[in-house]
Amino acid sequence: MPALKVRGALGLMSGTSLDGVDVAYLATDGERILAFGPTGYRPFTGAERAVLRAALDDAEILAERTARPGVLAEAEAIVTNANAEAVEAWREANRSWMPLDGGSFAAPPVDVVGFHGQTVLHRPEVGLTVQLGDGLALARRLNVPVVYDFRAADVVGGGQGAPFVPVFHRAMAGVLHRPQPLAVLNIGGVANVTVIDGEADPVACDVGPGNALIDDFVASRTGAAMDAGGELAAAGKVDEDAVRRLLGMRFFTLPPPKSLDRNAFKAAAKVHGGLDRASLEDGAATLTAFTAAAVARIVPHLKRPPKCWIVAGGGARNPTLMRMLAERLAPARVEVAERVGWSGDHLEAQAFAFLAVRALDGLPLSYPSTTGVPVPMTGGVVVRP
């Protein structure tokens, strides 16, 4: 097999929490991560977030992945523009990042952009996943090749279309001195886990609602985007009966690989959560406990329980959630990504930079043990300006 080419790649990620666009740079040949570079962030405005939330509702009726009824077309334009602005701001901020021979400076070389887009619908059971974002428009605006629409080929091939980051987690774990089995838990709007155990292919799946239910509940009661620092949940009392009812969802009885749309968790919480009768603090505490308990429910489905959990994403900044995770995952060690030298806030953006380079070389992005696809598959659509 010929040597793989090292490329500089930018990854762009806007997760189901609808907070904004993460930007991350790395140099990689698609197998090894040779260097990390600068990161960036472009938040969604309140008005943009309102359109994206409306798009989640309008997407419920979609039967065709390219259709854009209701506000979906407006939302797609917002997503594409926000990602373009995120890269433009990153370029401006990092013009002097890399020293060259002779003492001059230049921006990091970007050979490709990995553009995740905004997931508004994910129903692999009917072969449908929709990520908003115009890859060709982004490539033309940035004048650089773009890889986007990462999940569609996997779903068409019979896979779950998520999670897509395990192959990146495997590369990261290869240089990490932690006991295995090792679990990498990303808590965004939906939480997903990768379990690495020796030479076997990683095992991965979505595990629960992540921050989505907490964020939606707090937003509906207060207008705030989240339970900052987990303070509301820390002041509340967990309704353990509600947690048990929510854990009765069939999803939690299924082994990996598996995935679920955030709206499915939202619907279950509306029916089984009893949140209408709960105080703000008690509701936040109950949903935070459910998020932690949902993560723990994956352990019985694994061949061996993880000895160590590394937590990334917005949920890692919630001390109340981290405490509940530690209690429910004991005796395993639970630590935030930054503690092991990883960027917890930009791990998924780094992953899609890595995946973009793999896609250029036709390397597998998903595996039977991560998405349930029949054979290892590449994916993504490559567009050039």
Image (cartoon, rainbow, N blue to C red):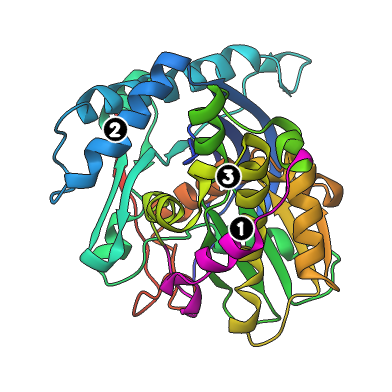
- SS type, badge 3: loop
> Which quadrant is the C terminus positioned in?
top left
**Residue 34 x %, y %:** 69, 49
Q: Please name the amino acid that badge 1 sits on.
A: Phe
Is 229 left, or right, of 315 in this rendering? right
Establish if 100 lies above or below 118.
above
Q: Please name the amino acid that badge 3 sits on.
A: Asn
Answer whether residue 69 is magenta in the image: no
- SS type, badge 1: helix
Q: Earlier in the sequence, mark 2 or mark 1?
A: 2
Is 5 left, or right, of 146 in this rendering? right
Where is mark 2, residue-wise? Answer: 55
Q: CA distance from mark 1 to mark 3?
A: 11 Å
Q: CA distance from mark 2 to mark 1?
A: 26 Å
Callout 2 crowding tier (Cα within 10 Å): few <14, some 14–19, many ≥20: many
User: Is 106 or 228 nearer to us in this picture?
Assistant: 228
Residue 39 appears in the picture as rendered: yes
Residue 7 appears in the picture as rendered: no
Mark drawn on residue 104: none
Numbered disc total = 3
Q: Badges 1 and 3: C-beta atoms under 8 Å apart?
A: no
Where is mark 3, residue-wise? Answer: 211
- SS type, badge 2: helix
- Magenta span of residues: 235-259
**Residue 178 x %, y %:** 84, 67
Q: Please name the amino acid that badge 2 sits on.
A: Ala
Q: In the orientation shown, which residue stands out farthest toward the front?
A: 277
**Residue 284 x %, y %:** 64, 42
Establish if 275 lies above or below 45.
below
User: Residue at 52% of width from left, 67% of height from top?
Assistant: 245
Where is mark 1, residue-wise? Answer: 290
